[in-house]
Every structure is written in structure tokens, then in C-alpha cells.
Image (spheres, rainbow, N blue to C red):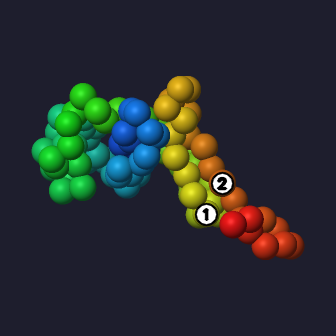
Amino acid sequence: MKIGPKVYWRKTTGEIIYITSQIESPWAVETTKEDDMNFYPQLKGHDPEQLDVLKLEFDKYTQEFQRAKGYWINPKTGVIEFSYPVVGGTDPV
């Protein structure tokens, strides 16, 4: 079974709190938001009402995560957005 990563993000700002690893295993099991918030130390202590989760397809954005210099969730659309280094120039300050 292939399970894509889940992106946990703050609803008000789009700040990404934690991204789970994608899993490929015959023993893989889908987990709930509640399961993850109890398991991952990075999510413990956060108000579940303030966090949302975006489930990604297996290998969906692998290259984007590797190439991007930053990423966040657009809080208005719930879509992940990426920023990339400027090629052949300097990054704006």
C-alpha cells in the first residue's frame, strides 16, 4: 500500500507545522488527524481546531519539495504553494 504525506498547517496563517513521511509498505495503515496529533511530538500541544491537514498523493510533490526554498499553504484556498530560488541571479531580499 502507498500512503502519501500529510501536511499539517495553521488555518489562520498557512504556516506548515509538520509533514508526515510518505509510506510504501504492505503493512501501511491510514491514520486519522487525532492519531497523528497523539503520535507526532511536533503536533502535540497544538489546538486541533487551529490545524488543518492536507493529504497529498504518494510522490505528488517530491521534486517540488526538493527544489523549493520555501513552501506554505494558502489559507484562503487550502492549496500548497512553493517558492523557488532565482536561477542565474540573486534572490531578492
Q: Position of residue 40 (x, y in %)?
A: 20, 53
Disc 1, disc 2: CB below 8 Å? Answer: yes
Vertical relation: 37 (above or below) 85 = above
Tell me where residue 54 sits by quadrant. top left
Whether residue 46 appears in this view of the structure is: yes
Q: Position of residue 78 (x, y in %)?
A: 50, 30
- In this view, the residue in front, 88 or 38, is 88
Q: Secondary structure at mark 1?
A: loop
Vertical relation: 66 (above or below) 78 = below
Q: Position of residue 18 (x, y in %)?
A: 35, 52
The residue lying at 55 percent from left, 52 percent from top is: 71
**Label ID, residue 32:** none
The residue lying at 53 percent from left, 26 percent from top is: 76
**Label ID, residue 69:** 1
User: What separation in Å lies between label 1 and label 2 (alpha carbons)?
Assistant: 6 Å
**Label ID, residue 83:** 2
The residue lying at 24 percent from left, 28 percent from top is: 49
Question: Looking at numbered disc 2 in the image, what kind of residue is underneath it?
Answer: Ser
Vertical relation: 47 (above or below) 65 = above
Whether residue 57 appears in this view of the structure is: no
Q: Position of residue 77 (x, y in %)?
A: 55, 26
Left-right relation of 92 to 61: right
Crowd band around label 2 with a 10 angstrom C-alpha radius: few (<14), some (14–19), many (20+) = few
